[in-house]
Amino acid sequence: MMKTTISSFIVLFAICSNAQLDPIREGIYKWNDFPVKKSELKEGRSILEGTSPHFEYIEMHATTQKPGATPGPAHANKDIEECLIVREGTMKVTIEGESRILGPEGVILLMPQQMHSVENVGDTDLTYYVLRYRARKAMDIERGRNAGGSLMINADSLTFKPSARGGGVPYFDRPTAMCERFEMHITQLDKKGPSHKPHKHIETEIILMLAGKTKMTIDGKVYQAGPGDFYLAKSGSMHGIENAGDEPCRYFAFKWN
């Protein structure tokens, strides 16, 4: 039997560009609710697919490569940008011939039209989220290049910045080929209570839980999440998050327009 490759997962989660897509829903997405498709030494979890205020196409899935899994062949996306987040394990990522080893909380910002591949080089499962998107406005490759091009960021290369409530780790805040602005950071709340007052902004935002328990209010509805779950607040929605437990919590926050 032919082995399923990473590119097969991309095909599995891809959709015909001519099909009618619905707007992605606002609210909570639970890790244990994501449908799982398994093949030899790999698993894929479909998370969301649709449109958003700034994207004519947005899709998110999670991939798990078991130790010894055969990586898919290097490939490039013609008009899709990607953001990858390592949940667990050790990843070797290669973009245009340059390779880097990333661990948990490592992040890749991948511009369109660049050859890339991902491989599990550890002795445990490698699990990572993949956010794929195409802007409603025209793709601007030159803008992305001028802002720094593709990124491969290891968490241990960044600096934790303490705050009164805990602290945070800035990853990037910049334009990309598809976004006028894409900002990403980790927030840590050491004690029970809110991160900040409820607010709203033009960007759509995802809060991806790493540790602890949180509660988030989005346009008057209250949701709760733990590790692996995430919240999605659309452009213009009033929202606010708080630590709902007695232990510290950590989460990625990333937003775009």
Image (tube, grey):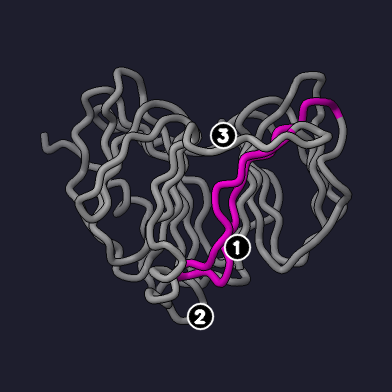
**Residue 200 part of the magenta-drawn span:** no
Q: Earlier in the sequence, mark 2 or mark 1?
A: 2
127 versus 232 height, above or below: above
Range of the magenta residues?
167-192
Expressed as whole percent of the image width and height from the top left, the position of residue 103 reads: 41, 30
- Amino acid tagged 3: Trp
Instruction: Report the mark closest to the observer, 3 or 2.
Output: 2
Expressed as whole percent of the image width and height from the top left, the position of residue 230 reads: 63, 41
Give the Cα separation between the discs numbered 3 and 2.
31 Å
Q: Earlier in the sequence, mark 3 or mark 2?
A: 3
- Amino acid tagged 2: Lys
Kindly identify which residue carries mark 3.
Answer: 31
Residue at 68% over, 37% down: 161
Kindly identify which residue carries mark 2.
Answer: 137
Q: How many marks?
A: 3
Kindly identify which residue carries mark 1.
Answer: 256
